[in-house]
Amino acid sequence: MTPVLLRLLGAVIGGISLVIGAPVLLMARLAVVLPGAPVAVRNRARLLVLAAAFLLVYELGGSAAEPGHRPGRQGGCDRLAALNRRFYGWGFAAAGVRLTCAPPPQVAPDRPVIVLARHAGAFNSALMAHLIARDLGRDTYTIAKRCAALTPGLRRAYEASGVVFCRFDEQGKARAVQRLRDQAVGALPTDALLLFPEGTNYSAKRWREAIAALRAKGREAQALHAEQCPHVMPVHPAGAWALVTSAPTADVVVLAQTGLEDLASGTTGLGYPPSGRGVVDVGWWHIRADQVPRDRDAFAHWLGEQWREVDAWIAAARRGDHVTQPAPAEHART
């Protein structure tokens, strides 16, 4: 399908959806601000408002995004960053969602950075790219499943910014790892190489299934580790290993968020109580390149321990402990 037809299709989808859904959106907005509404109702209402804002920004407003250019790049990253700013700005405000972020880490300006992020909740992937552009000042490069491009407008923005779509069957996984290596080898100092080591969005059902799959493969130690981390999915080290070995001078930033997963969880989708606060907490921490293990088995263990830190940070944030930045683990300092 040609770009013109894709743009037209996106505008039609967005326009029809907004017109038909206007009464529903009005009721959803009332549910967000109405005191005493049940947590599940409030969260679903926020999700509806965010979905409408998503269509408005990426479909109806996508063609108006300022193109911009950065040295050595085609400008697509700036276009996606502009769309993300709009969505996570007034879109979050309209839905009654507040973003609270720890201070960003100070990464070396003369080399790329690898960002390993938790994967949970609606609109999570674009949020990570938004934070990378806003707080780290970097262009985001990554791979994604084709289903990540929810609409034609988002697909155009992703493709223009260098996101590579991959199939994640057995053959596709090998190609995906090679794509990551290619991105890492060609990365500029202004780039961030984004990856979600969990490989899929968190839910309690997927968490249980992943643990059962580990046990079926005889990986009892990994299964026990996963059971001790109920807020995150077990990590897959292959993609992260491809990045750190192909960009050996790149520092690593671990990026965690919690709050988005509440919006679509209802009352049973999470393995922990959903929150109706309408707050998305963000924390991240920085590991210098010379602190990242260069032995493959040691790296896999290190990555698992980093995700143990993510799990502990999420638990503290959801308790309302006002966590601003995760404390670096001892294994990350040695």
Image: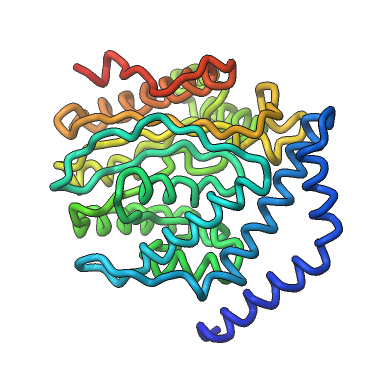
Residue 79 vs residue 26, the one in the foreground: 26
The residue under the point 35% across, 17% down is 327
Residues 75 and 256: in front is 75
**One can see residue 220 in this view:** no
State which quarter of the image contains the C terminus.
top left
Using the image, determine if residue 103 lies above or below residue 135.
Answer: above
As drawn, 220 above or below 17: above
Who's the residue at 68% across and 27% down the image? 275
Residue 302 falls left or right of residue 150: left
Q: Is residue 281 above or below residue 112?
A: above
Residue 312 on image: x %, y %: 47, 18
Quarter residue 4 falls in = bottom right
**Coordinates of residue 250 in the picture (x, y in percent):** 19, 42
Which quadrant holds residue 236?
Answer: top left
Residue at point 37%, 63% (across, down): 78
Quarter of the rendering occupied by the N terminus: bottom right
